[in-house]
Amino acid sequence: MISKNKIKAIRMLSLKKHRYESSLFIAEGHKTVNELLRCFECDFIAATEKWDRPDYISENTDIQCVTENELKQISLLESPQDVLAVFKMKKLSVSDIDFRGKLTIALDGVQDAGNLGTIIRIADWFAVENVVCSQGTVDVYNPKTVQASMGSLAHVNVVYTDLPVFLKGIDSTIHKYATTLDGENIYTTKLNENAIIVMGNEGNGISPEVKAVCDKSLLIPKILNDRFSAESLNVGVATALISAEFRRQLNFR
């Protein structure tokens, strides 16, 4: 049986302050937990008998078998999924990464935790190794972000920095593309694989400071330009479309 103090400590990790004080974060569900176990150091696991324990898990991992009711007491989900794990955060910065010769996604003030998780999953699908976030972007270890990433956080490096300063100081051979509503048609623009694609805030788009240090603006064109069509795309959807076009052009080239 999990102690009350342990339950309290785990549930407190829903708050950013406590996550960073302890350098710990929560993941739930067998798909997410099993993927993160490959790349993150695990501090604690609470699992029911239904959890399919992977062969590669360390023998030293603290695992406690719990009932479904006990799992509900510590879970942040309405319907817990067999296993909850507490992982140690990774300490990464932009100085640890070589961005040359790669496709990178940068996020300027993305606020929705689900959107960030979806973008990490999209990056994983399109073999984008690195996602660079502005300081104003939602926390990658937010439980909703971790869940939405569906384990892709294990395969993608996510770092935070002063985005305008980072873009201004990046190697001049790396192309910097801003996604805007007044950019060039992405489907008729020749794209470069040595590039950073900047995606903006859900409501305000890319900040003027970030746009000013980008080399070119790109647009996903509408098919119908009438007053009844949507004003913009969800940032996750837009990231998927742009990533797909970059990969289509580069793979076919």
Image (cartoon, grey):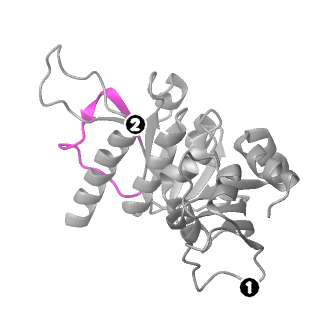
Residue on which the image places disc 1: 59
Out of 149 and 167, give the one closest to the viewer: 149
- Cα distance, mark 1 to mark 2? 41 Å
- Left or right of 131? Residue 27 is right
**Residue 23 position (above or below residue 199):** below
User: As shown in the figure, which amino acid type bears the numbered disc 1?
Assistant: Glu
Placement of 79 over or under 213, stated as above or below: below
Residue 172 visible, this angle: no
Q: Quadrant of residue 57?
A: bottom right
Q: Identify the image quadrant of residue 60.
A: bottom right
| Badge 2 amino acid | Val
The answer to which of 83 and 87 lies nearer the viewer is: 83
* Viewer can see residue 27: yes
- Residue 113 pos. (x, y %): 54, 39
Q: Is residue 253 left or right of residue 202?
A: left
Helix, strand or loop for disc 2: helix
Assign a secondary structure to mark 1. Answer: loop
- Depth check: 104 or 21 in front? 21
Q: Which residues are magenta?
A: 177-194
Q: Which residue is mark 2?
A: 235
Which of the two discs, 1 and 2, sits closer to the camera? 1
Is residue 189 rendered magenta in the image? yes
Labelled pair 1, 2 in contact (Cβ < 8 Å) = no
- Kindly give the residue lying farthest to the top in the view shown: 227
- Quarter of the image that includes the C terminus: bottom left
